Image (spheres, grey):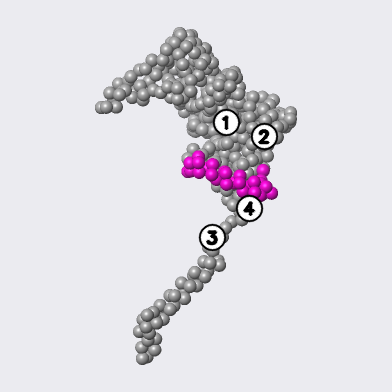
Amino acid sequence: MAGRELFGFITPNGYHPLLFAAVNQYLCDQELLFRNCFEPEDPMPTPAQRIDELCKEIREHDRLYYVLAEPKITDLEYDRLLSELKQLEAEHPELTREDSPTQRIGDEIVGDLQQVKHRVPMLSIENTYSLEELANFLNRVQKNLGTEPVEWVLELKIDGVAAAIIYEDGKLVRAVTRGNGEVGDDITHNIRTIGDVPLRLIGNVPSLLEVRGEVYMTNSDLAKLNLQRSEQGQPAFANTRNVTAGTIRLQDPKLAAERRMRFFCHGVGYCNGIQSTNHIAFLQELQSYGLPATPHVHHFTSAQEVLEKIDQIQESLHELDFEVDGLVLKVNQFSQRDELGSTSKSPRWVVAYKIEKYEAVTQLNEIRVQVGKTGAITPVAELEPVQLAGTTVSRKSAQCRRDRTERRAGGRLGCRRKSGQNYSTLSESNYTGELRTRNHSSFLRTAPSAKAN
């Protein structure tokens, strides 16, 4: 039948043009099929190539998660990428690199911590405790710089442990505590366990980069850790700074990894090849490499603007999930920092504006439920009255859902107030009474009648 249909295309003058078009199309299709069989468009990558792809992809997702807080995949998808990488490295151990995302936690327990000399001393920061002292510092800097305009950068003074992290050609090679400013302890094995510290930087990185910052723990992570310790019959840690200071010096990195430490970069040490000429640009440059820069940074063009805004900024600090014991004010331009120089103890271009903390332990007598005008329900803690910074504190509304579900009447908890603040907070980190698990009880968000309406 096919032959008779084909014969119909033949004419007395030769072959019909449609016949040639059909045959030509058939031959083209056969050639394409042949190529697809023997020359695939996307050849399978070799194990080395796939490992390289996975490392780059995981580092990029780490940057999106830890630095930009904009994750593009779910935790499950991330775990699958990491699992595939682990499987490939197990099958090809010769391809496992020291800076692989799978190599954060070492297997070996280190001996005594080795001491390392800082190439550039990690000096302390001068403290101020009032707006008058802060104004005197600002005036002194302006006087030393003459008529040059001075830009200022205001950052959080995170209550953690200072450390320096050194990268060579983008690879993490060493991490050191501040120590006495001249010499610190090598804590590389524990810093590698921190999820937001990249083992290898991304982008066009400097040949040598030393970033300085703060190792810290969030209040919510400390609450979880203390709950676990309570269930195991172990004493609770007093506060986030104490547990961080002890954790970074542990000899077993596996134990350090369990405590979920974190890191913020806020300073520069000995470097070769950085592009920035001021602090704001430097923080942005660090983020482009995948490093977590210190958050909530404010840029001011005058000293007067600093003095006008600093109290307003201080009022929002209680909303943070990590401890802050003040603010840090820095000259923005690196050239002006070089001109100002340092004393034997501290740089002349930076100062801390300290916030004094007042703490007390009191009795939680009862938890009442307060219904607002909109129907919103807020648990209110009725406390045994306690004096705090010249104020009697006897009741406190819960700051977050964590406050509502992890404290039980009859226990004892910490109450905290900071100088300059007109509010007090309940401190989970100092809570020593009986803890309840999150699913032990629940609270309504709104009153039933409000929901119905």
Residue name at image x 48 percent, y 43 percent: 73
Nearer the observer: mark 2 or 3; the answer is: 3
Q: Which residue is mark 2?
A: 189
Q: Quadrant of the N terminus?
A: bottom left
On screen, residue 25 versus residue 43, left or right, reads left
- For mark 4, give the secondary structure: helix
Residue name at image x 42 percent, y 22 percent: 441
Residue name at image x 59 percent, y 56 percent: 45
Residue segment shown in magenta: 72-98
The answer to which of marks 4 and 2 sits earlier in the sequence is: 4
Distance, label 2 to label 1, CA atoms, is 14 Å
| Residue 297 within the magenta-colored segment of the rendering | no
Q: Which residue is mark 1?
A: 260
Distance, label 1 to label 3, CA atoms, is 40 Å
Q: Amino acid at mark 3?
A: Asp
| For residue 67, above or below residue 318 | below
Q: Position of residue 432 (x, y in %)?
A: 54, 16
Nearer the observer: mark 4 or 2; the answer is: 4
Distance, label 1 to label 4, CA atoms, is 31 Å
The answer to which of marks 1 and 3 sits earlier in the sequence is: 3
The answer to which of marks 2 and 1 sits earlier in the sequence is: 2
The answer to which of marks 2 and 3 sits earlier in the sequence is: 3
